[in-house]
Amino acid sequence: MKRLAGTALVAAALLALPLATQSDFVLTILVFAFLQGMLAVSFNLVFGYAGQLSMFHAAAFGIAAYATHLFGKHLGVGYWGGVVLAAALVAAISVVVGAICFRFRLREFYFAVVTLAFSEMARLTVLNWNSMTNGSLGINLQERPIDGTLAWYYVALGALAITLVVCWRLVHSWMGRAFVAIRLNDELGDTLGINVFRYKLVAFTAGSIMAAFAGSLYAYFLGSLEPGLLSIDTSLGIIAMVLLGGRRAVAAPVLGALVLTALPHLIHFSAEIRSLVYGAILIFSILVMPQGIYGAAAQLIRRHA
Amino acid sequence: MLQFERVSVHYGKNRVLTDVTLQVGAGEIVALIGANAAGKTTSLRTALGLKAPSAGRIRFDGEDITRTPTPDRVRRRLVLVPEGRQVFVKFTVAENLLMGGYRRSDRRHLQADFDRLYAMFPRLAERRRQLAGSLSGGEQQMLAIARGLMAQPRCLLLDEPTLGLAPILVEEIAHTVRRLAADGVTILLAEQNATMALSCAHRAYVLESGRISLTGEASTLQESETVRRLYLGH
């Protein structure tokens, strides 16, 4: 009940926030944070719950961004048609990649390395398929499917909310229990008759689909496509957000996304010093708060309650 | 109820089971005794479908289940309690039990089962909210058995339930096994501790280097020279 009230309060505050500030600067940062939050929350379904360190998340994000544009342009399905087709494409690719990895029972670092290889294959394809992707120069997106920062604010907030609800429902279902059981001990899961292969694949594919929606939105808010969307930097950024926010609650990674998205804009140093400061903050917080901001806050509240 | 017909199992090129034929009748307690690496664990894992046989057939209720995936076998209530007190250490006792009911078609209504198992294992009831990792070895073994019972087994495969436990706990496990059988659960008990296994079982098979070397009534085997010399230590 308390949790429900808290959630309602946060939701109301976020819905009403544009009444308090019309600042384009603030809203822009929040849109980026919400979309990155979507990415982090869906990644955490795969990593924090099902225990699979997927390095394919950035690829799902970037493939969908490009595919949305290309489907829209070449098939004439418009932006939203492109979004749906891109998600379907990512789902299909994820099933193949996931099936290969899980059929060969790749675990932990082996799984991370192989998904990273698939991710790099996707990035190199985008980089070199000049006729379609314009290579390293990327593509400037002319269409404005959503107009104005305020509209984007609500779309991004809604998309994040849907992601959170879907992940929350999944995690608190029998399937979610199976995800955690697989993370804790997948051999014992097998013994109990849990279909480990199927559930790993479901977690991986569901996470990728949500990343795909995030990618379709992100690129159009940014206004451009570039191969860097699929890079290992994006993957590492997602991991950083999850570690900083926390892994043990569905919404915790959003905190990490907020901090890491806002931070670069709030630290007014030259670019080189900025990334140093940014890295230092990240290392420091992970050392001091291994359970992330969420875990540290929960502990603080418990101590004072 | 459970039958092996000339089952062989390989790990790579190593043959670990050779032509194993055994059967467990409904309501029976059957012991599978043998030394380390004789193939006891492999036999049980093969029965559950965690390891595919390279030859032979496995039947459950007379039906060929040799190629049936593990989840379907568990759904038909063929259940394994693996060796080494395997529990989810970061789940609470109650959560561990819940996972045991994963393949139940009525898994939304498990309260009666919880009540029954907590009555059967009062120490688990006291610790239901504790992490399984904080339990003692004996308690973890009880939890593993209770989790198996959550699946409402008709045939329960117990892999070395007494391994590393103090004599008093061994006696408690033996008592639990007899009680389950009295409730109508069919049990295949793999044990290195032949004294305990033969004291519970109706019949037994002796497994030596992957082959069945001896079989008979438990009482007969208790008297057998070979068994006494090799497994009972007197």
Image (cartoon, coloured by chain):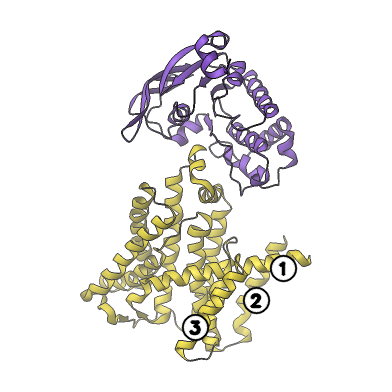
Chain colours: A yellow, B purple
Q: Indicate the position of residue A57 as horizontal and vertical percent values.
A: 41, 65
Protein chain holding label 3: A
Q: Is residue A88 above or below residue A256?
A: above
Where is residue A89 drawn, in percent x and y? 33, 61
Q: Is residue A219 left or right of residue B113?
A: left
User: A201 or A143, which is in the foreground?
Assistant: A201
Mark 3 — residue? A276
Residue A13 lies in quadrant: bottom right
Name the residue located 58 percent from the left edge and 75 percent from the top edge. Answer: A284
Judge if badges 1 and 3 mark residues of a common chain.
Answer: yes
| In this rendering, the label closer to the viewer, 1 or 3 | 3
Q: Amino acid at mark 2?
A: Ala
Residue of label 1: A300
Instruction: Say whether residue B101 is visible.
Output: no
Residue at mark 1 to residue at mark 2: CA–CA distance: 23 Å
Is A123 placed left or right of A26 in the picture?
Answer: left
- Counting residues from the start of the chain, the first of labels 1 and 3 encountered is 3
Residue A13 is labelled as 2
Give B140 or A194, whichever is nearer the viewer: B140
Query: Taking B38 as reference, is A151 above or below it?
Result: below
Residue at image coords 71%, 43%: B128
Residue type highlighted by circle 3: Leu
- Count the labels in the image: 3
Seen from the viewer's position, the closer of residues A73 and B215 is B215
Whether marks 2 and 3 lie on the same chain = yes
> To which quarter of the image does residue B173 belong?
top right
Query: Can the viewer see residue A251 in this picture?
Result: yes
